[in-house]
C-alpha cells in the first residue's frame, strides 16, 4: 500500500508524485518477491543503493553504487571497519612493516577459498593485482597502484606484458605476500581495502574473459555471493558459507534495490519495504528540512566534495582565464541554502577541511565565503564578478560576445539528488548568463551514459563529485594527476604532478602538507580545471530499533556484512 499523505511529520501532498511511479514500485515489489503468486523468500535486509550498478567487477567499477556491491562480493588483504571506515585485517590476518615503511609482508589466513570452493592463495593475490594494474584492464582507479613499485610504469606502458617491469608484489609462499612501495605510505592499509585491490578468481577470468561476472556461480572472495541480478530492479546477495569470517556476517540474505525515484524509495522505506536508504541522493530535497527532524534520518559529516569538471581539451575551456571567470561568478552560498539544504559547507577547494589534519588551499571566491555580514558578502561577490568579467574579456569574449553555446551535463533521474543536480545546473546557468553574458544548456543523462561520457571527455561542463576512499588529502588530489584514470578533465600539469610526487616521498607531515597545499592551489585557483561547489553532508535512513550495524564514518563506508535486522517485519523479534 502507499503511505498516507498524513503520515507523521510529512507534509500533506508530498507523495502525490507517486502516481507517476506506481509501475516502477509494482515492478520492484514483484521482482524482489514481495507480492505475487510465487513469493520468493523474504530477504533479511533490504537496502536501497541509488543508481543501477554499471558493473560488479571490482577492478573496473567506478561509481559508489557499484562499489558497495563490489565490496560485498570481493575482499582484499584488508577490509573496511564498519565503525571507523579504516582498513582492518581481511584476507590477511596480520602483517609486518619494515623499518623504512616501504616493505609490507602480509600473512594470509590458512584455508581461504573462493565461494565456489577453489583455494585462494598468495598467488591469487599477486595475479589479481597484476590484472588490475595492467593497461588492458583500463581501471579508472589504477593510480592506487602507483604507490607500489613499478605500478605507474606498468599502467602507462605501451609494451607487451613480457616487456613490462614486474609489479612490486610477490608470493613468498602460499600464505605470504610481500609488497614493495615506492615511498612510505601511511594510508596503505586503507588502500588495500579498496575494491581495485580485491582478490578476483583467476580460474574464472581466464576461462570466461570479460564475461566472467555473468557466469553462474560467480566465484567470490568476500562475505557474500551473487544470487540474482535483475537490471533496474535489484540484486540479491546471499551469505558466502566459505567466507573466512562467515560467523560474523550478520545477515543471510540482502536485497539491494536501485531506482531513480526518491518519492518511491522514501515511500517504500516509510512503509517498511526498505530497511536502509544508504544515500541521501534518493531523499526528496524538498523534504530536507522535515526529514532532518525525524529519528530515522541520520546526518553525518564525511569526506565528500561536489564540483564541476571543465573539459580542458575543448575551446574555449582550454583557456584557464575562461575557467577562472566562470568559477568566480558562482554564488555558492545560494546553492547550498536554496537547493541542497542539508547543512553543506560551500567550497572553494577540493579537499574537505580537516581531512586528517590537513589545512587546504584557498581557491577562487574565498573572500565571499569568508564574509561575515551581508554587506561584506555583497562587496566580495561584486569584486569577484568584476575580475571574472575582466578575465573573460582578456580571453577574447568581452561581455560574452563570441562565446560559443556550451552544455552542462549531469546524471538525471526522478528527483532527490538527481533532481538536485538539475537545480544546481539551472542556478549556475542563470549566474553565467547574468554576470558573463554566456549561455549554457542543460543536458541530463542516464547514469551509465553520464559515466561513459565523462570518462571519454564527451562533454563541455559536467557534474562531478568525489567521496574520499581513505582519510588523507591525496584521496582527492591524486584524482587530477595527468595519468589518473579518474581525472576526466583532460587537464595535465607537470608542476602539479611533481608536487604530488614530492609529497609522496616526504615523511615529515608539515612539509608534506605544504607540498599538497601548493598543488591544490594550482588546481582550484591558478588553473581551475574544476569548480568546487560544496562539501558533502551525508544522510542515511534507517530505524535504529529495527536495524543494527550501521555507523556514520568519515569515509562513508557501510559494509553490508555488518548490517542486521533486530526486529522482524511486522514488529516481531
Image: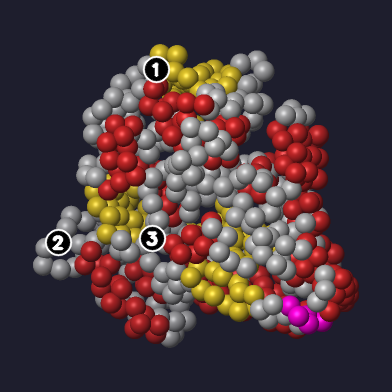
Q: Please tell me whether mark 2 or mark 1 is closer to you in this view.
A: 1
Q: Quadrant of residue 502?
A: top right
**Residue closest to the eye, 460 or 108:** 460
Task: Indicate the secondary structure of the residue bearing disc 1.
Answer: loop
* Magenta span of residues: 399-403
Give the numbered dot on residue 52. 3
* Magenta: main secondary structure: loop
Please indicate whether residue 493 sits to the left or right of residue 478 in the image: right
State the image coordinates of residue 416 (x, y, percent, origin top left).
49, 71
**Residue closest to the eye, 494 or 346:** 494
The disc, 2 or 1, on the residue closer to the chain's N-terminal end is 2
The disc, 2 or 3, on the residue closer to the chain's N-terminal end is 2
State the image coordinates of residue 486 (x, y, percent, origin top left).
58, 50
Mark 3, Cα crowd under 10 Å, few <14 / some 14-19 / many 20+, is many
Q: Residue at x 51, y 74 (%)?
A: 444
Mark 1, Cα crowd under 10 Å, few <14 / some 14-19 / many 20+, is some
Give the numbered dot on residue 39. 2
* Real-space Cα separation, disc 2 to disc 1, in angstroms: 44 Å
The answer to whether residue 329 is magenta is no
Task: Indicate the secondary structure of the residue bearing disc 3.
Answer: loop
Please indicate whether residue 385 sits to the left or right of residue 157 in the image: right
Image position of 42 with respect to 331: above or below: above
For label 1, the residue is: 175
Does the rendering let one see residue 208? yes
Q: Residue at x 78, y 82 (%)?
A: 401
Amino acid at each position: 500500500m502507499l503511505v498516507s499523505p498524513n503520515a507523521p511529520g510529512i507534509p500533506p501532498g508530498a507523495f502525490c508524485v507517486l502516481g507517476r511511479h506506481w509501475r516502477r514500485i509494482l515492478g520492484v515489489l514483484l521482482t524482489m518477491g514481495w507480492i505475487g503468486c510465487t513469493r520468493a523468500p523474504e530477504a533479511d535486509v533490504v537496502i536501497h543503493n541509488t543508481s543501477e550498478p554499471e558493473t560488479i567487477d571490482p577492478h573496473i567499477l567506478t561509481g559508489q553504487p557499484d562499489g558497495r556491491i563490489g565490496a560485498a562480493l570481493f575482499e582484499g588483504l584488508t577490509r573496511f571497519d564498519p565503525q571507523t571506515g579504516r582498513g582492518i585485517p581481511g584476507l590477511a590476518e596480520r602483517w609486518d612493516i619494515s623499518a623504512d615503511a616501504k616493505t609490507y609482508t602480509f600473512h594470509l589466513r590458512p584455508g581461504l577459498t573462493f565461494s565456489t570452493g577453489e583455494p585462494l592463495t598468495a598467488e591469487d593475490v599477486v595475479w589479481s593485482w597484476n590484472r588490475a594494474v595492467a593497461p588492458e584492464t583500463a581501471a579508472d582507479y589504477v593510480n592506487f597502484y602507483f604507490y607500489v613499485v613499478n605500478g605507474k610504469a606498468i599502467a602507462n606502458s605501451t609494451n607487451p606484458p613480457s616487456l613490462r617491469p614486474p609489479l612490486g608484489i610477490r608470493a613468498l609462499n602460499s600464505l605470504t605476500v610481500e609488497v614493495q612501495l615506492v615511498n612510505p605510505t601511511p594510508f596503505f592499509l586503507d588502500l588495500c581495502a579498496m575494491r581495485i585491490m580485491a582478490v578476483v578468481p583467476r580460474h574464472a577470468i581466464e576461462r570466461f574473459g570479460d564475461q566472467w561476472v555473468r557466469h553462474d556461480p560467480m566465484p567470490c572472495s568476500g562475505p557474500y555471493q551473487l544470487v540474482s541480478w535483475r537490471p533496474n530492479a535489484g540484486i540479491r546477495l546471499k551469505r558466502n558459507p566459505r567466507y573466512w569470517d562467515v560467523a560474523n556476517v550478520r545477515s543471510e540474505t540482502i536485497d539491494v534495490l536501485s531506482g531513480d525515484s526518491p518519492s518511491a524509495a522514501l515511500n517504500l522505506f516509510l512503509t517498511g519495504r526498505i530497511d536502509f536508504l544508504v544515500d541521501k541522493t534518493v531523499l526528496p530535497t524538498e523534504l530536507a528540512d522535515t526529514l532532518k527532524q525525524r529519528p530515522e534520518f541520520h546526518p553525518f559529516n564525511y569526506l565528500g566534495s561536489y564540483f564541476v569538471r571543465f573539459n580542458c581539451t575543448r575551446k574555449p575551456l582550454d583557456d584557464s582565464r575562461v575557467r577562472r571567470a566562470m568559477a568566480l561568478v558562482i554564488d555558492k552560498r545560494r546553492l547550498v541554502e536554496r537547493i541542497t539544504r542539508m547543512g553543506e559547507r560551500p567550497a572553494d577547494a577540493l579537499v574537505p577541511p580537516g581531512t586528517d589534519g590537513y589545512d587546504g588551499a584557498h581557491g577562487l571566491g574565498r573572500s565571499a565565503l569568508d564574509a561575515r555580514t551581508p554587506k561584506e558578502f555583497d562587496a566580495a561577490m561584486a569584486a569577484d564578478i568584476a575580475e571574472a568579467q575582466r578575465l573573460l574579456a582578456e580571453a577574447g569574449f568581452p561581455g560574452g560576445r563570441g562565446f560559443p553555446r556550451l552544455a552542462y551535463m549531469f546524471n538525471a533521474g526522478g528527483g532527490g539528488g538527481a533532481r538536485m543536480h538539475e537545480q544546481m545546473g539551472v542556478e549556475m546557468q542563470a549566474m553565467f548568463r547574468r554576470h558573463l553574458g554566456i549561455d549554457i544548456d542543460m543536458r541530463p543523462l542516464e547514469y551509465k551514459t553520464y559515466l561513459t561520457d565523462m570518462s571519454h571527455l564527451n562533454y563541455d561542463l559536467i557534474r562531478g563529485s568525489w567521496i574520499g576512499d581513505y582519510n588523507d588529502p591525496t584521496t582527492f588530489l591524486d584524482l587530477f594527476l595527468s595519468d589518473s584514470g579518474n581525472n576526466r578533465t583532460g587537464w595535465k600539469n607537470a608542476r602539479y604532478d611533481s608536487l604530488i610526487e614530492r609529497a609522496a616521498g616526504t615523511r615529515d607531515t608539515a612539509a608534506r602538507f605544504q607540498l599538497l597545499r601548493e598543488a591544490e592551489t594550482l588546481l582550484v585557483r591558478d588553473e581551475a580545471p574544476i569548480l568546487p561547489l560544496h562539501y558533502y553532508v551525508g544522510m542515511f535512513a534507517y530505524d535504529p530499533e529495527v536495524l543494527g550495524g550501521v555507523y556514520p564514518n568519515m569515509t562513508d563506508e557501510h559494509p553490508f556484512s555488518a548490517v542486521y535486522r533486530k526486529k522482524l517485519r511486522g514488529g516481531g523479534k
